Image (spheres, rainbow, N blue to C red):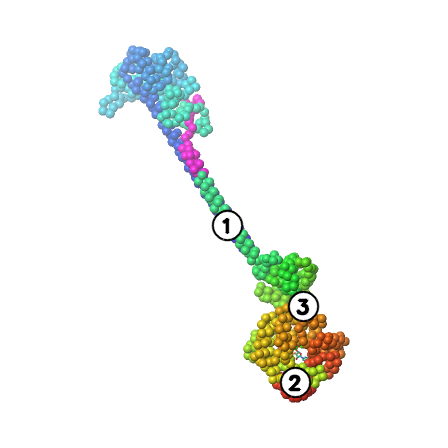
Amino acid sequence: MKELLERHRLGDRWIAAAGLVVASAIAALLGIAFLVAHNVDEDSARRDIALAKNGLDSLVTRMRHDLVSLTQWDEAVKRVVLKNDTAWVHRYFGQRLRETSGHDLSFILYASGAPVYASIEGVSVYNDLYNWVRPQVDPIVAEVNNAYAKRTALPPRSNQNGDVESLPEPASRAAFRHIDHKSALVVAATIVPNHDATLLGDHSPPVAVSVSFLEGDLLRGLAKDLSIDDLVLEEGAEPAKGKVGIEVPMPNEGPRSWLVWKPRRPGTEMLNRLTPALAGIAAFIGLVGFFVLRHVRRSNRQLAESERRATELAFRDALTGLGNRAQLIETLGQSLSDLRAGENLALLFIDIDGFKDINDTLGHHVGDELLTVAAWRLAPTKNCTAAVRLGGDEFAVLIKLKEDDEIVGICRHVLDALRHPTPAGDHVLTVSASIGVAVAPEHASDPETLLRRADIALYRARTEGRGSLRMFDHGYEEALHKRGRTERELAQALARDELRVLYQPLWSADGERMVGVEALVRWEHPERGTVAPMEFIPTAEHSGLIVRLDEWVLRRACERAASWPGLALAVNLSPSNFHHSDMVDRVTRILNETGFDPCRLEIEITENMLLHATSEVLGQLAEMRRIGIRIVLDDFGTGYSSLGYLRRFPVDKIKIDQSFVRNLGVTEEAAAIVECVARLGRALGLTVTAEGVETAEQHRFVRAAGCHQLQGFLFSPPVASERISEFARSSDAGRPQAAVSHG
Ligand code: C2E
Ligand code: CA
Ligand code: CA
């Protein structure tokens, strides 16, 4: 049972572990998917930032290039420096810059820094407008001038063709500035000739300036180039939360500007797109896992449950609900191995007295109720480790005894409890029980021996009569062994013809005439010598050998007695013979085979047998009487002793038991009984025999009482057939002198 529970718990643990593995696997897969998506998102953001930086750099380069392409031009030098042709400047500079590149503001300044030309969004305006941007732009213009000055101070360089470059290298600068609270790209470049180096003369070159605000078309163009839809310019310490961006490089003093956008999340998008599918798959795996595990768990449960039920059934007695023999053996083994020093384990075998009779007479349902109540009463026995029904009306109780526990006291309690009146069916029954006890470790330490010895003790208790209690004793076991040996030897003796029949004469009341003989068996044991029937008849009855034995005696006696005409032959038949329905046939066959006259045969049966006789047995007796055999009631007075029933039963003769004859002159009761039985027998027309007549005194009394026949040592002990033949031959087979010598 324990093992079963353990296995069950283990199974559950495995299932839980498997469930955890499936759940973890799903969680791990989802985790990996999220991680991958996150990484992809971050990569994408990084890439976009790098692209944006490049884009911004390209923008700066383009704007600078656009300006420089206009300022390195002979015509421009001519028109600005020599002619001050504002109309041309407007068309080819202000308007063009606006149209081609979208510059917002454009200026031309003399080297002195004075504005020559100004335009806003391609529209020519007052030169003073330059003052608006001067603080931010002048430093850049100064840088350009410085750079130009530095270059012209250097010696002329050679170009790719090896020609000396006489043209001064133009200087340009591009930088971001805050202008009117907006971020703007400021580009400045010197206006220099591209062919005719002389055009400038000694003049320092004028400077062209363009300002492009990072907004409107410019920003949209940049966004388009970068494929970023939501590109915006923001100010702040860093891009707003949830956005990424690149910083627009501004001088330190102003606020920081950022080109920001919401980062694309291709990983997350992919994940989002995949999520329903992933969730579906996860749910599917989870669901399948769940159902599989649930199924496994259920099967496991069912298996465990059916195993438990099977084990329970295998260990339970269906009628009483107590455990059964298997349970006892299991518990006994466990309890014995758990037994500590100083502890004792008592095994009680309990048998309800006379249960078979109750079952037979009142019916099985009454018997069943009785057993169930007995079970209830046994279950609460003190210190009871197990109370089981062994089968039939046999129970066993296992009791753990502490040092001061007194087993006999406990057993008496059990006996008392069982003796309480029990309502069963329409009856209230009061039954007793017999108990046999074996105690471990005193009587045995192993289950089998303890069981066997408790059984032996019970067997002994049963033979002692109702309500007995017996502790195991080694003597009982020896007796049993002896009986077993006797049984085996007796079977051999029958086969080897070691049995012998003696005949004890029956005399007429006056002791003058031998009227018959009783066949009495003897066992000529090779070692023990002659064994008296009382020593082996009970064993033969117990083993069932008695049927063969009685049959053998009957045959042998009939053979012998055939040569004793006129003498009746009495043969004892044990009750077991009557359990066989063919008994009369067998007796008849023997009579036929031996040619013995049935009218000379007397069958001796006991009072008790007659008392318990079924209608079938009575039928057998009647049948025997019909063919002439007489029925003799042996040992009359020792049994139930109801004289009334003599009338109802098919009996021809009664033999007053030896004990009464022996007690004649000893107890008054004996004389009264002998007289009474003799009178009654005569009144019923039965032959009355007195057994065990040993003295002349007894002879006188039984004769006076009216007994018809006498049997006893006074006349003759049981003798060999030859002696009977001798008696029979002598005409006056008379006075027992001859016979007494055999006593
Ligand atoms: P039982 O049928 O009552 O036989 C009479 C017994 O009393 C015999 O003992 C006999 O020897 C003994 N007896 C006879 N006269 C006297 C006497 O004056 N004083 C004393 N003290 N005893 C006397 P036995 O032969 O030992 O037989 C004992 C019992 O064994 C018989 O009692 C009978 O019940 C049984 N028995 C003997 N032979 C057979 C047999 O072949 N079959 C069966 N089934 N039982 C047998
Ligand atoms: Ca007898
Ligand atoms: Ca007798």
Residue drawn where x is 51% and y is 48% of the image: 298
Range of residues picked out in magenta? 251-279
Q: Which residue is mark 3?
A: 465
Residue 17: give x, y in percent of width and height: 49, 47
Towards the viewer: 595 or 67? 595
Is residue 181 visible to the viewer in this orientation of the structure? yes
Is residue 483 visible to the viewer in this orientation of the structure? no
How far is the residue under mark 2 from the one under mark 1?
85 Å
Towards the viewer: 631 or 435? 631
Front label number (2 vs 1): 2
Residue drawn where x is 40% and y is 26% of the image: 229
Q: Decide whether residue 195 is among the magenta residues.
A: no
The C terminus appears in which quarter of the rendering? bottom right
Q: Which mark is residue 742?
A: 2
Q: Which mark is residue 228?
A: none
Q: Decide whether residue 276 is among the magenta residues.
A: yes
Residue drawn where x is 37% and y is 29% of the image: 51
Residue 717: give x, y in percent of width and height: 66, 82
Q: Which residue is mark 1?
A: 299
How far is the residue under mark 1 from the one under mark 3?
55 Å
- Residue furthest to the right in view is 668
Residue 40: give x, y in percent of width and height: 40, 35
Classify mark 3: helix, strand or loop. Answer: loop
Image height of 618 relative to 520, above or below: above
Rate crowding at label 1 as few (under 14), some (14 to 19) or many (20 or more) other CA atoms within 10 Å: few
Question: Do the CB atoms of the residues marked 2 and 3 lie less than 8 Å apart?
Answer: no
Please state which amino acid type lies under the numbered disc 2.
His
Image quadrant in which you'd find residue 171: top left
Towards the viewer: 711 or 49? 711
**First in sequence: mark 1 vs mark 3:** 1
Image quadrant in which you'd find residue 39: top left
Rate crowding at label 3 as few (under 14), some (14 to 19) or many (20 or more) other CA atoms within 10 Å: few
